[in-house]
Amino acid sequence: MGRRVNLATIDDKPVAVAADTSAGVPLALLVANPRNPREDLGDLEDLKSIAKRQLQPCLVVTSKGYLALWPEDAERVGHAQYVVVNGCRRLAAAHKFGRAELLIVHDETVAVSRGELLGAAVEENIGRQDFDIIEEARAVEAVVAEYPSTREAAKARGWTHGWVSQRRALLKLTPEMQGMLRAGDLAVRDARRLARVPAADQVSTWRAEQDAAEQRKKEQAEQRKQQPPQQRRQLKQPESVDPVVTAVTTPEDGGDPETDTASVGPSVVTAVTTDGEAGSGIPEPRNDSTSSATALPTVTVEWTNPQVVADLCTANMTHADLEAMLDILTSRL
């Protein structure tokens, strides 16, 4: 429900009066945020029901408060009394589908600074699937420009420094690469990496990476074909079967169980668990003298290859840990 506002007293100018904003504010008194981060409001069909019912009010500031921050936008604000900060799509849908008024929430503290107003406008759209990622990057860049540093902007808006740096990096992509990112043909993680490449080399670098990845797939497929059938079966996920426990009795002194069956003295019973599959043999007993050296295979990591290191970290770290590591790395660049 909106709050009561005497619209006749705003700016000391006589205007149309809405005695109770719970009944809605006429569209003539509202204007969309000229600094809206969304260049394209998209298809408004999902808001068609606004003709009968508005489910969420619009966040607004007075035009006076807005123009104190951007006096150069006076012509775009016109005679409106409120600037819609959050809810520009709702305002557009109301015009399109014939709703005469909108419910509002008036919060003038949003107009305390450019950074605050831009940040509020961006935060409404972050995370929405239909919010273009390049528009988001440009909006983040505009917010950062209103603060002394990237780190201060991130702290003020409650964003991580790493996330802000990642979004800003996307603006270093060439128009062609940005178009591919927008179309979904380029993954964000690849886009961030390519943004560090000189603009003239981005396309050729991406194509070379694609060719290399395709070649690796072909080589791996060929290697699998050349493996003996038994090895290929071992690579498959084993079926769930009941294990078979085989008890092997040996003399305590380590003698041969076949030849020492008549010997007197304590013996050791060793339980060997097998997979229960028909034809599978009992595995060789563990040799304690060498097990410590062969228990785990030695893994060699190609630390000079960023893709290899990234894949290793992604496979072994949580999302929160990855974000923390990214913050640390970004701060040291």
Image: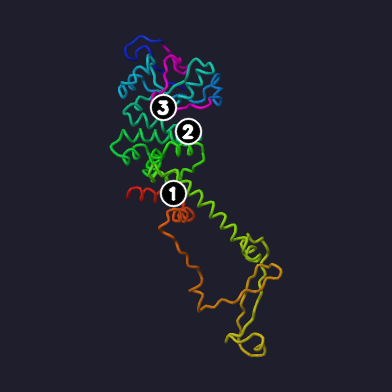
Pick whichever, 320 or 329, lies toward us: 329
The residue at the point 36 percent across, 43 percent down is 161
Q: Amino acid at mark 3?
A: Asn
Which of discs 2 and 1 lies nearer the camera? The answer is 2
The residue at the point 50 percent across, 77 percent down is 290
Q: Does the stretch in magenta take in 19?
A: yes
Separation of residues labelled 2 and 1 (CA atoms):
24 Å
The residue at the point 42 percent across, 25 percent down is 59
Q: Amino acid at mark 1?
A: Ala
Mark sitting earlier along the chain (2/1): 2
> Mark 2 Cα within 10 Å, few/some/many (few <14, many 20+)?
some
Q: Amino acid at mark 2?
A: Phe
Mark sitting earlier along the chain (3/2): 3
> Residue reaching furthest bottom?
263
Q: Are marks 2 and 1 in contact (CB under 8 Å)?
A: no
**Percent position of residue 324, x then y:** 39, 49
The residue at the point 57 percent across, 87 percent down is 253
- The answer to whether residue 218 is left or right of residue 191 is right
Separation of residues labelled 3 and 2 (CA atoms):
12 Å
Residue that mark 2 sits on: 131
Mark sitting earlier along the chain (3/1): 3
Q: Does the stretch in magenta take in 181?
A: no
Magenta region, residue range: 17-43
Residue that mark 1 sits on: 320
Corner quadrant of residue 133: top left
Separation of residues labelled 3 and 1 (CA atoms):
31 Å
> Residue reaching furthest right?
278
